[in-house]
């Protein structure tokens, strides 16, 4: 039996993990609000707002210090031990991009001493796209794929078949956390510009820049729909419901921190654009995990897109 491990930036709650077709457990990253150190505990998919998210946003807007840290290898070792004791013959550990966090390195250290083989999948992404990759890994494992193949294909799928685009209210929090990657050189000229940021080779990079937030959200929807249409072609399906082949369906998670009403409006806009383009799309709105939100800041809006099975 193959079991899974993931980290908290995937945004999966206990109910999400329990719903997977194979056993799965989560290792939380840590978040420090001032002097208070606590585990990142996602509320789960489809949760619009949470008390923890509201507290984080208020703390950040008030100028409070926020920092995050990766799990220690011992935290992974404990999870691997529990999964092995429960009957796992191999474990696939799916995690946030190694270019953004030391989480993958900590998992590898623990894997070296685990009682059963542990295969690490560096997804190259985070947030809801990472959660989708965990689901993809679970379906592969439940279908009988060997653990090494599950890890390799999950990493490839996450990097090649998902898209995450987000629009921060300000770049300040990304700058503080050092997560801005290739976009760093744009900071000065972007003072009056709303950038659209996404993942490029595992780091955060600027995909586009526009003058107003409303135009940024319009552009975000256009990018997501275009990616779905292009991906449908690559998959051999059709984006039009009138074709002979079954249309490739897509899932989109609209994510935010302290911008729930705007996220709902963005979801509506995205659904309208997808319908007009003939792109079959299932959507949901949810809050980012605290660790991801600590780097993007309150007011952030984003969308993760992936193909539905």
Image (cartoon, grey):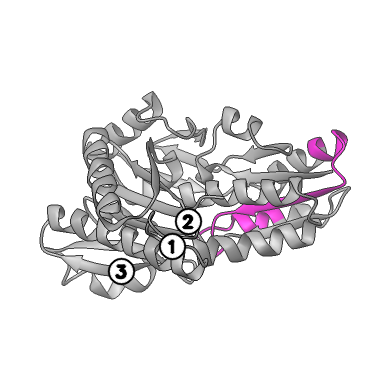
Residue 59 shows in this picture:
yes
* In front: label 2 or label 3: 2
* Mark 1 or mark 2, earlier in chain: 1
Residue 215 drawn at (x, y percent): 14, 58
Q: Is residue 92 magenta?
A: yes
* In front: label 3 or label 1: 1
**Residue position for label 3:** 206
Spatial separation of the CA atoms under disc 1 and disc 2 = 6 Å
Residue 171 falls left or right of residue 81: left
Q: How many marks?
A: 3
Q: Nearer the viewer, residue 175 or 301?
A: 301
Q: Nearer the viewer, residue 109 or 20?
A: 20
**Residue position for label 2:** 248
Q: Which mark is residue 238?
A: 1
Characterize the local packing of mark 1: few (<14), some (14-19) or many (20 or more) Cα atoms within 10 angstroms.
many
Q: Is residue 197 magenta?
A: no
Q: Which residues are magenta?
A: 82-107
Spatial separation of the CA atoms under disc 3 and disc 1 = 29 Å
Q: Nearer the viewer, residue 255 or 283?
A: 283
Characterize the local packing of mark 3: few (<14), some (14-19) or many (20 or more) Cα atoms within 10 angstroms.
some
Residue 132 drawn at (x, y percent): 54, 48
Cβ–Cβ below 8 Å for labels 1 and 2? yes
Residue 280 drawn at (x, y percent): 39, 50
């Amino acid at each position: 039996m193959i079991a899974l491990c993931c980290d908290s930036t995937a945004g999966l709650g206990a109910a999400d993990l329990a719903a997977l077709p194979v056993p799965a457990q989560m290792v939380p990253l840590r978040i420090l609000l001032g002097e208070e150190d606590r585990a990142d505990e996602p509320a789960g998919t489809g949760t619009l707002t949470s008390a923890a998210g509201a507290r984080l946003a208020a703390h950040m807007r008030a100028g409070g210090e926020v920092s995050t840290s990766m799990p220690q290898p011992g935290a992974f070792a404990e999870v691997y031990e529990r999964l092995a004791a429960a009957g796992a013959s191999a474990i696939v550990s799916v995690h946030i991009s190694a270019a953004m966090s030391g989480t993958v390195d900590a998992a590898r250290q623990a894997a070296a001493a685990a009682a059963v083989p542990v295969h690490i999948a560096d997804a190259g992404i985070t947030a809801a796209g990472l959660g989708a990759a965990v689901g993809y890994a679970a379906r592969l494992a439940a279908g009988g794929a060997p653990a090494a193949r599950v890890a390799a294909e999950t990493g490839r799928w996450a990097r090649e078949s998902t898209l995450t685009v987000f629009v921060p209210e300000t770049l300040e929090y990304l700058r503080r956390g050092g997560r801005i990657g290739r976009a760093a050189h744009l900071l000065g000229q972007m003072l009056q510009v709303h950038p659209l940021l996404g993942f490029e080779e595992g780091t955060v990079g600027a995909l586009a820049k526009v003058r107003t937030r409303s135009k940024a959200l319009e552009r975000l929807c256009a990018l997501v729909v275009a990616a779905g249409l292009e991906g449908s072609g690559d998959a051999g399906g059709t984006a039009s419901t009138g074709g002979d082949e079954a249309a490739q369906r897509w899932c989109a998670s609209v994510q935010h921190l302290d911008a729930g009403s705007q996220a709902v409006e963005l979801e509506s806009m995205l659904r309208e654009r997808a319908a007009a383009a003939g792109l079959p799309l299932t959507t949901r709105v949810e809050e980012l995990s605290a660790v991801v939100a600590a780097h993007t800041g309150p007011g952030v809006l984003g969308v993760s897109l992936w193909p539905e099975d």
